[in-house]
Amino acid sequence: MIIPQDHIRNFSIIAHIDHGKSTLADRIIERTGLLTAREMQEQVLDNMDLERERGITIKAQAVRTIYKAKNGEEYMLNLIDTPGHVDFNYEVSRALAACDGALLVVDAAQGIEAQTLANVYLALDNDLEVIPVINKIDLPSAEPDRVIDEIEDVIGLEAHDAPLISAKNGINIDEVLEAVVHKLPAPEGDPDAPLRCLIFDSFYDSYRGVVVFFRVVDGRVRKGTRVKMMASGAAYDVVEVGTFGAGQLIPCDELSAGMVGYLTASIKNVKDTRVGDTVTEQARPCAQALPGYKKVLSMVYCGMYPADGAKYPDLRDALERLQLNDASLTYEPETSVALGFGFRCGFLGLLHLEIIQERLEREYNLDLVTTAPSVVYKIHTLKGDVIDLSNPTNMPDPAVIDYMEEPVVAAEIMVTTEFIGPIMSLCQERRGVYEGTEYIETTRALLKYTLPLNEIIYDFFDALKSRSRGYASLDYTLKGYVRSDLVKLDILINHEEVDALSFIVHESTAYERGRKMCERLKEEIPRHLFEIPIQAAIGSKIIARETVKAVRKDVLAKCYGGDITRKKKLLEKQKEGKKRMRQIGNVEVPQKAFMSVLKLDQEN
Amino acid sequence: MAPQKKKPLAVYIHLPFCAKKCLYCDFASGPADAQQIAYYMRVLQKEIRSFSAIATLYRVETVFFGGGTPSFVAPVYIEQLMNLLRSQFEFSDRAEITLEANPGTLTEEKLKIYRAAGINRLSIGLQSVHDAELKTLGRIHTYADFLESYDLARKAGFENINIDLMSALPRQTMALWQDSLAKTAALQPEHISAYSLSIEEGTPFYEKYGEGLGRLALPGEELDREMYHYTKSFLAEKGYARYEISNYARPGFESRHNLTYWTMGEYLGFGQAAASFLEGRRFTNPSTAEEYWQAARTSYQRFRAMKPETVREQMEEYMFLGFRTARGVSREDFKKRFGTSFPRVYEHTLLDLYKQGLLTQEGGRIFLTDEGIDISNIVLAQFLLDERTSL
């Protein structure tokens, strides 16, 4: 079946978490007959277990369907699903760049969220045609008219003929498909021009090597074409090209301008097929790569250590394998006095970190100790060198430091007006610089702040949610580096400095953080036979102290009627508890204490 | 056939009935009517009979009627149970046969029947000499009730009596505890058990004192230990030696029944929630009445089907049980029992614990120091072996 270029529609769905993106995708797939309802596993596009559980799309996915429109003609619809989190902003931008249009799904009860807005702007920046879709209209709390006005006022999109749907209950899905066919443009591009393809994702398959997802902008590609990745310079002979079925790859002879598909070429590593790179034909290269490629930099680092030191090689293998699939994950070996051998890993953001951590624990069965996340600081030494510091332990002697810089982000927080006060004070506490407020409508506003990245990587998101009863949403982009008065806070347990607990903090919050950290550790560290001082220090100056009192009594007075089994279980529990501890000097510290710094504001 | 040498056995019989459950009690026990008691006794007797196949291999050295309050049930039941035991097992001439009793449940008549049935040791739950404390604990008796019961017991001819006391009670001061100890010692019982109260989950005490502000009513760890240390020195002065973490006796009156538990002797427990250790197998009866009724008939089969403990498990138990006694453990005993010396890991553990002053040795025996007793759970846990440990 040959479908002409003008009957192709490449689009994605933009939505805030929970607004129904994946459900709508499912309905489209179902409606176009790719799968019957019975065959559908819930939310076909999110194929990692983790994605399904968290309800977040982590990697871009794509699916091709054939839709027979009401005018009797058949259209090829390529739906490209984008990751749904600020950590993956760049991936989102590349996935959008592979589309010609987008559906903006907005919850009829909740309206627009900060992240939706950010993604809409990203779509508009990529010259995408955006069609608003109002979802969940069957909810009792649905206010489609209010939401339509909001879309028109805030984004300036015509929304009065937006399809009003319920993806969950399959209401008005055809309207969405008709809108896709008639309102979104067909892809442009010259099939006879030199090959130019945009990579928007890739994954590693142990049989085929890297499977590259791309959009053909110009030209054609088929089996045997020798292609070149313009940024990485790597060249390969294409083994297979094809399109996306539901949850499977369907080989075909050729992909030409306007089409979306995949290729395999016995590529060993996803690093050679970076998202955003341009694929061209080696024999007849295009004149210029597609715009927008950039190498993604890790924003957040942390140390990851196997809880059982003997599992170090397993952790290394697991990271290696994850990296095959995730070029934005970086890692290098490091050692900690407290934790032994491990890796300093770099991530796009905290969610990315958590996902990797969870995958290591779940898919690779590793028990991990993770140190507090850190951002990359720039240290300007008196000699004029600039050092990138991602591990607080490596901070040079303050005597050789001229000044330090920390990364800041431009943050946009969408919030209902009643919570503006609490959210502004939160931003203030986190050293935010107020940049302005935009009123979306009378009851909602967009707060703009410049915030230090290290203030938002721990628990900012949770704090935001708790101070707005869950209503505030956040989006941010890296803005650059600013000079800052930073100090390294060390933690001493029983007078021994614990390298894995050191962190870098702004001078103004050092006392507060040090005190809280000591309090937290006091709760985490079990009592020993001796008293354990826990101290926070800057250099040689102690700024906070707590004491874990010594155990005076731990005895089973009565051991009745010869029930030894029960007593033994008690002792076994005690012994098991010890196993999950780390030895720091003569103090046993539970693994989770190393994550304490993450929870400093939990009681607030 | 040559006469076989019989093995010593301790028998425990659980009678889970009492007039009213004490507020701190988490044992399988509670009030019951005459019909329920009668039914339980029938089941219990069936269970005892089910072991007839191996009964001839043993000689009973001790019997212990525990509860609940064994003195709460009609004494004829005690008589019947003793008769049954004697018909099943050979008894040692010097068997120690103990019955737990609570003040307020003893009469001259009952005591007479007990004597006739062969009970030669009474363990009386006094807990405190202060009526206010007894009330806090939810006990049904007063101190005066106890004195009356004690007097009756002596008059009935009981020459081996234990008195249970409890320290670290809510709002208890050192002076109050000293008073309980002094008054008890003055009565010159042969044996004193002095437990420090532990608050168990699922009891009314846990609700009240287990968490939050309620805890403040309990003596702190420091005071608790002070009371404990005082107990040892005071009772020693009065002629009672501490022979187990919470047990004190005049010479020759250590409870042989309880020592069986600590020295890995064999014992057979009958009744709801009763525990046994026989032929290397440990098994425990169900703790609820209904489940026990179901299981009692097949107790012997369950025992047979049980996997014996591994040598590793027995070594662990030998250590952590032995350390509960003042005599502790010895390398010689260990070797005799297991045919091999201490596993090498124990030697490292021992060395650490000597250095920390938690263990000490004397005359070839290794035992806990007073400091070691205070935190004995931490010490004893270190004698559990890993699967991988080589023996």
Image (cartoon, coloured by chain):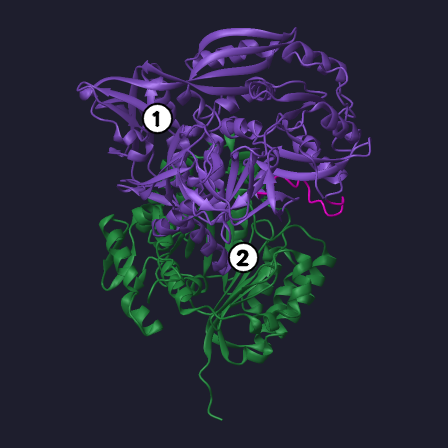
Chain colours: A purple, B green
At which x and y percent is residue A599? 45, 28
Q: In front: B152, or B364?
A: B364
Q: Amino acid at mark 1?
A: Val
Q: In front: A345, or A65?
A: A65
At which x and y percent is residue B386? 38, 59
Asked if residue B83 shows in the view, the reply is no
Q: In front: A324, or A50?
A: A324
Vertically, is A395 above or below A472?
below
Vertically, is B324 above or below B295?
above
Tell me what residue is drawn at x 37 percent, y 26 percent.
A375
Which quarter of the rendered picture does the C terminus of chain B lie within? bottom left
Residue A376 disc label: 1
- Letter of the chain that mark 1 sits on in the rendering: A
Q: Quadrant of residue A189?
A: top right
In space, the residues marked 1 and 2 are separated at their CA atoms by 71 Å
Residue corresponding to mark 2: B100
Q: Are marks 1 and 2 on the same chain?
A: no
Question: Is A396 left, or right, of A41 in this rendering?
Answer: left
Residue span colored magenta? A35-48
| Secondary structure of the residue carrying numbered label 2 | strand
Q: In front: A440, or B325?
A: A440
| Secondary structure of the residue carrying numbered label 1 | loop
